[in-house]
Image (cartoon, rainbow, N blue to C red):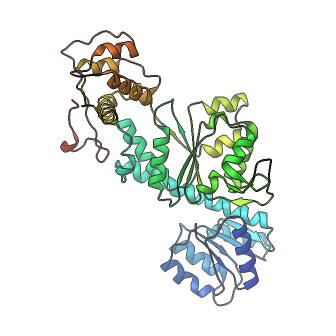
Amino acid sequence: MKILIVDDEEHILLSTKSVLSFAGIQDVKTIEDSRLVMPILASEIIDLIILDLFMPYMSGKDLLNAISQNYPHIPIIVMTAADEVETAVECMKAGAFDYLVKPVENTRLTTSVKRTIEIHSLKYQVMQLQEHLLGNTIKNPSAFDPIITASPKMSSLFQYCEAIAESGQPVTVIGATGVGKELVAKAIHDVSGLGGNFVAVNVAGLDDHMFSDTLFGHRKGAFTGADQTRRGLIAQATGGTLFLDEIGDLSETSQIKLLRLLQEQEYYQVGSDIPQISDARIIAATNKDLRKMVEKGTFRNDLYFRLCTHQVQIPPLRDRLEDIPLLLEHFLDKAAKTMKKKKPSYPAELITLLSSYDFPGNVRELKALVFDTVARHNNGMLSLKRFRELVGNQPSPPASTPFKTKLWSIHCRGDCSDCQKSAR
């Protein structure tokens, strides 16, 4: 977010910019001459304006009206010495988002700015979501290439991921074990345009000390054995994404520290009382029902709502059976290359056999099954015997009902004839 501060008093500009900078808001532009504001808005992208009312040349009231008429999408915070209810009402009617009376407390200023940015961001997200869902297309299909799928459900999920990717808000990816939560999180990062790294960590089993040390790092001498300063993963994710897997297993103390990181964008290294600013985007994942955990008191309610600004629910494999032929072919090819064997063929009945299985371990279980079978295979066609041993003795399907699927393109979701094929 780029912020423009307009005030004819230089010390106000400097102090306001310093307060915002300390709060982690770095992209701030200041201007003393109110006549230059409209030309700047015509040539630059400004996301928020902090505006004084009483200035020479062009008053703040005139600027407020002009900006509201020509750039209604830019939120404006009026910051003035006029402590008058009538003036405040007039400004709010003219389009001001908030009204601050000088001298403004630092906390009041940063809270107003952050709240304005958050609401502005949410409006932008709604617009992006409408554009993606109404457009019914995926603009960055390459970001989702690692996810092997032919499911329209997954195509809709990809569209939603694209719509929220640039928001910068926290995302929680929900799904059963083995559905590919980290792959979806990585795709969101790739689409977001963030220049930093995608840093993943499984927080299950981390006690509070290990959680703090792993994420936030420590200063030299912070504890026995801390021979040198260590950067935490949150620092490694600067400008990028920090992916927290198994967030439902986080201890209560660690939940409080994560909440502060989300609310204030700051954290403390172990052994340090100097706050560090973080701009890393947080994506969490879990296979647990966080709502029920909140009701039971094992997961903080405020953290839940912070993390779940956006929720991505990945359907289990049993709800997208059209993916089984693709995944089977993919894992057979991958297993054969890994083990330096010729890719084996399989009987048509295998697809229906696998489609009748519940796959509690989802895609990960199917992968393990295929790799194990290929490892035991010598030559010829794969035998159904081994699959039946692994998935259970399912009845053989009639030969007249082979499983077929339509391969929906993630570009057009099957609307064009070129994207419709039958799976072998």
Q: Residue, x 72% and y 83% (percent of image)? A: 54
306 over 99 or under it: above or below: above
In the image, taking residue 228 as reference, residue 122 lies left or right, namely left
Examine the rendering and report whether any part of residue 129 can be seen.
no
Q: Nearer the viewer, residue 213 or 150?
A: 213
Question: Is 321 situated left or right of 305 in this image?
Answer: left
On screen, residue 68 above or below 282: below
Residue drawn 34% across and 11% down? 394
Residue 147 placement, left or right of 411: right
Q: Position of residue 303 (x, y in %)?
A: 68, 43
* Image label count: 0
Look at 70% across and 35% down and name the residue there. 299
The residue depicted at 58 percent of the width and 66 percent of the height is: 1
Q: Pinpoint residue 134: horizontal percent, then vertical percent.
A: 38, 49
Can you see residue 270? yes
Residue furthest toward the bottom?
Answer: 57
Q: Which image quadrant for residue 424?
A: top left
User: Is 106 drawn above or below residue 352 in the view shown?
Assistant: below
Residue 351, x across and y down, in percent? 28, 22
Residue nearer the viewer, 93 or 298: 298
Q: Tell me residue 273's x, y (percent).
A: 81, 58
The residue lying toward the viewer, choosing from 202 and 335, is 335
